[in-house]
Amino acid sequence: MGALSVCTYVVIGLVGVPVFASGGGPAYLLKPTFGYLLGFIAAAWAAGALSSRIRPAGMAGHLAPAFAGLFIYYAVGAVYFYFVVNFVYRVQVGWQLWLVNCVLLTIAGDMVLCFLAAAMAARIRRFL
């Protein structure tokens, strides 16, 4: 259901509703950061599938799906970014600059968010 939700959001943005950071519309497909939106879809599906398989109970159990989703999100987004910048825009970006800008500058904050989400999920699950 999470992947379907994110997919709906992406489709709404692609048809022109300005829900993305820089607006919306089909031209957004050629933006280097569009891959992170695709990564959201894949990450939501993977985190949901993993959660339904392992049925996490505590915070530690919720961390595995969160970090799996984070890894997929960065893998899809960063690779898309690299290919669009290098092969569509034809701006040569080396892998070191790509790694720093697309992963290392932001992943620490996202890891903190994974811990916070896992803690919240564990607390909320007690009431369900």
Image: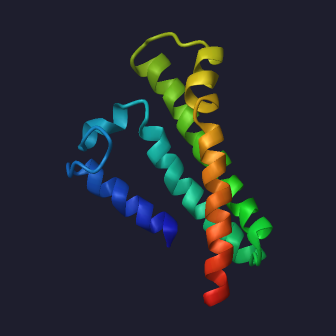
Looking at the image, which is closer to me, 81 or 127?
127
Percent position (x, y) of residue 96? 65, 16
Which of the 4 image quarters holds residue 30? Answer: top left
> In the picture shown, does residue 36 fall above or below 40?
above
Which of the 4 image quarters holds residue 57? Answer: bottom right
Quarter of the C terminus within the rendering: bottom right
Q: Residue at x 70, y 53 (%)?
A: 67
Q: Residue at x 51, y 10 (%)?
A: 92
Percent position (x, y) of residue 45? 58, 63
Q: Residue at x 42, y 30 (%)?
A: 32
Looking at the image, which is closer to me, 124 or 17?
124
Image side of residue 102 versus residue 84, left or right: right
The residue lying furthest to the top in this view is 92
> In the picture shown, does residue 8 fall above or below 38?
below
Percent position (x, y) of residue 33? 43, 35
> In the picture shown, does residue 83 fall above or below 22?
above
Q: Residue at x 60, y 12 (%)?
A: 94
Image side of residue 94 versus residue 85, left or right: right
Looking at the image, which is closer to me, 97 or 39?
97
Colour scheme of this structure image? rainbow
Percent position (x, y) of residue 53? 74, 75
Residue 98 visible somewhere in the drawing: yes
Image side of residue 97 versus residue 38, left or right: right
